Amino acid sequence: MKSALITGANKGIGFETAKQLLQKGFYVYLGSRDLENGRKAVEKLKSEGLTNAESIPLDVTDDNSVKAAREKIGLKTDVLDVLINNAGINGGEPPYTALEAKTEQFMAAFNTNVFGVARVTQAFIYLLRKSAEPRIVNVSTSVGSLSLQSDPSWPAYNYAKYAVYGASKAAMNMYTVQLAYELRDTAFKINAVCPGYTKTDFTNYNGGAVEEAGKRIVKYALIDQNGPTGKFFSEETNPETGEIPW
Ligand code: NAP
């Protein structure tokens, strides 16, 4: 049975992704920084007959928490097939503009959205390397695309609301490019995927269905050996091929 670890899987897009991977026969470790929320999420899945799920305490901003999660999963398995770096934050309270956002907001957003991705990826790379078909999906956003943010014809052009969040996701995108390059001669497929504007706590429940967002992520978690690596996808932005510029 293939296995997956999803960070921030107690709710929203992470939870939905866990559900869809379970439906596809995976064993899923649901990372949750709050023990009780993680337990409740797993209970909910189990009540729907999705029993191969387990909650793992995991705060991506905390080295000790990441280390403990790695040790816990390492006791259960020698191999991890899929890592989904999904945990993400906006960066505190507004304003999020380039001129007004506080340094603390940038630090918080980067700690979760960039350093958290690096922390978790580095901690789990050993287990992922043991998989015949290792996959990493870094959950990104089209507002983290430098090309689109500077294209006047793009609907969210210069969307000042996202100076903090957008900067952190752009940095995470670069990490994705570097990581994919470092692992280019292996079986790894590593991509950044935007789930699209989606109804979750993050958006005060505005946007599209969470099921659609989950499907967009799962697609790249299951991509076959001929699939892309080191690319950026947003089906919302490019419904034809999905690929968007960095
Ligand atoms: P959400 O409902 O707010 O869920 C975010 C998840 O991340 C929660 O489980 C949260 O845990 C977790 N998290 C936050 N900080 C964490 C940390 N330090 N350690 C571990 N987990 C942490 O948001 P969502 O919409 O599902 O977002 C999921 C991902 O999709 C994010 O990376 C976001 O940037 C991206 N995204 C979302 C949209 C959208 O429209 N919703 C669009 C594009 C991209 P708690 O419950 O403990 O807070």
Image (cartoon, grey):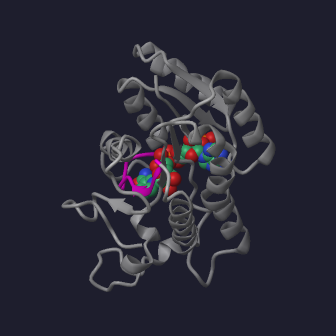
Q: Residue at x 61, y 26 (%)?
A: 55
Picture residue at 35% right of the left edge, 27% below the top: 24
Quadrant (top left/top right/bottom left/bottom right) for the C terminus: bottom left
- Say if residue 90 shows up in the picture: yes
**Spot occupied by residue 227 in the image (x, y as percentages of width and height):** 33, 52
Q: Which residue range is magenta in the image? A: 187-201
Report x, y in % for residue 26.
Answer: 44, 26
Q: Is residue 190 magenta?
A: yes
Q: Residue at x 78, y 47 (%)?
A: 63
The location of residue 177, given as percent across then percent down, is: 50, 66
Q: Nearer the viewer, residue 81 or 59?
A: 81
Q: Magenta segment: does it hold 169?
A: no
* Relative vertical location of residue 38 with respect to residue 202 in this rendering, above or below: above
The number of callouts visible is 0
| Residue 197 position (above or below residue 126) | below
Q: Residue 233 appears in which quarter of the rendering?
A: bottom left
Give the image location of residue 234, x and y in percent: 33, 60
